[in-house]
Image: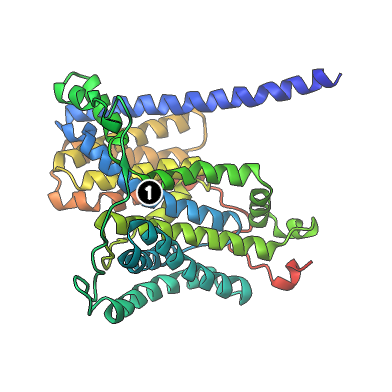
Amino acid sequence: MTAVTTAPAASRAPSSARRRARSVLSWVLLGFGLLLIAQWVCDAPGLSSSSTWGSALRLTVPIAVVAVGALYSERAGVINVGLEGMMIGGTWGAGLFGWFGGPWVALIGGVVGGLVFGLLMAVLCLELGLNQLVVGVAINVLAAALARFLSDIVFSGLDGGSVARSPRIEGNVPRVSLPFLSGGFGTPDPLRDLEATGIPVLSPLAGIVGGLTRDVSLAAIIGLALIPLTAFVLWRTRFGLRMRASGEEPAALQALGGHVHRTRYLAVLVGSGMAGFAGGYLVLISQGYVENQVAGRGFIGLATLIFGNWMPGGVFAGSALFGFSDAVGLGRPETFRGMLFVLGAVFVLLGAVRLRRRLGVRAAVPSLILGAVLLVAALVLPLPSALATAAPYLVTLAVLVVAGTRMRPPRALGRFFPRQNSSR
């Protein structure tokens, strides 16, 4: 009798996993097909070049890491608008520590810099019960001002330093390539040769795979590894269960013997440490702290969290989209036009799917309208070249307009839970 009742439950998990895998594969193939069409229609070979996709990977990492850090905090019920300030603290800490000890120590300094502002946020929001949105905005302003003030004190008198930058960090984090495909460990690099041939389909595929697997920083690999690690922690550990309960029903967690206050403290500190790591990663790219190098990525990370529906997989998808758009902004104008074509086509298809599934006009119409506007802009309208530099911010707004109707944040997000209620 037991075997009969448990067999269907055991078979449901592989079936669900297969459905998710098929869905992911379908979207990947669709995206690749749209990329080929956009490359031909817009005459934009840079869409599939290895340089574009290598830059996209490098620029995806800080957004993904800071968004995953916010996932910890917000899944526990604490709104984290201070991500930008935590990243700024991470960049300054990485500049200081890296000047003393090199690139690996710079990453440690980035984590420390993020933790400082995370601890400040935890004390103000969890101990004193101040408004979490106001505290987050205050941390963003404070971090920028404090970084400039400390730079004037610490870096101004040093060789290569100033009020706006730290001395250069000597050395680099090692980079790796995939053996026998991208030339790793002294092996041949057939993907580079295949990309140069210009063969339809195969050449763009070689450019994409080569860009994602050639000269990848170990720091980037560590950052990307935090995404599956976060998924495991949230859904496969006791701490993750308590953290999700703290963001959904804190009173129920407390009634079952959990400690809401301690859980939220740990979540905020872990999230701020990741935001600091993301700032430290930016310092490694430029080999030093530079004022304003965060450039709004903390806010983009928050938008990515919302777009990803507070799920690790969605956060990664959103981060990859914003990282790619950022890389496109560094390329030629026709590459930006091609990206608009791909994005517009995806939005139109998404709207059509929502209509077919009868999810409501409110869910489908914004996607259809915005997709049509982007397609017209890509194919007809003259676009100023300076517009490409704003690509990640435009994509952020577009994605939030389309995805905002389907989001469900944790129920207790932003709700203060006094310490006396969470004591045991």
Label 1 CA crowd tier, 10 Å (few <14, some 14–19, many 20+)? many
Scheme of image coloration = rainbow
Pointer 1 residue: 219
Q: Quadrant of residue 280?
A: bottom left
352 vs 281, nearest the viewer: 281
* Position of residue 369 measured from the top left corner of the image (x, y, whole percent): 34, 40
* Position of residue 3 measured from the top left corner of the image (x, y, whole percent): 81, 19
- State the residue at coordinates (36%, 61%): 106
66 vs 151, nearest the viewer: 151
- State the residue at coordinates (55%, 54%): 72
Drawn side of residue 117 relative to residue 180, left or right: right
- State the residue at coordinates (17%, 31%): 45
Res. 376 visible in picture: no
For numbered disc 1, what is the local secondary structure?
helix
For the N terminus, the quadrant is: top right
Q: Look at the picture and state if 273 lies above or below 337.
A: below
Res. 222 visible in picture: yes
296 vs 424, nearest the viewer: 424
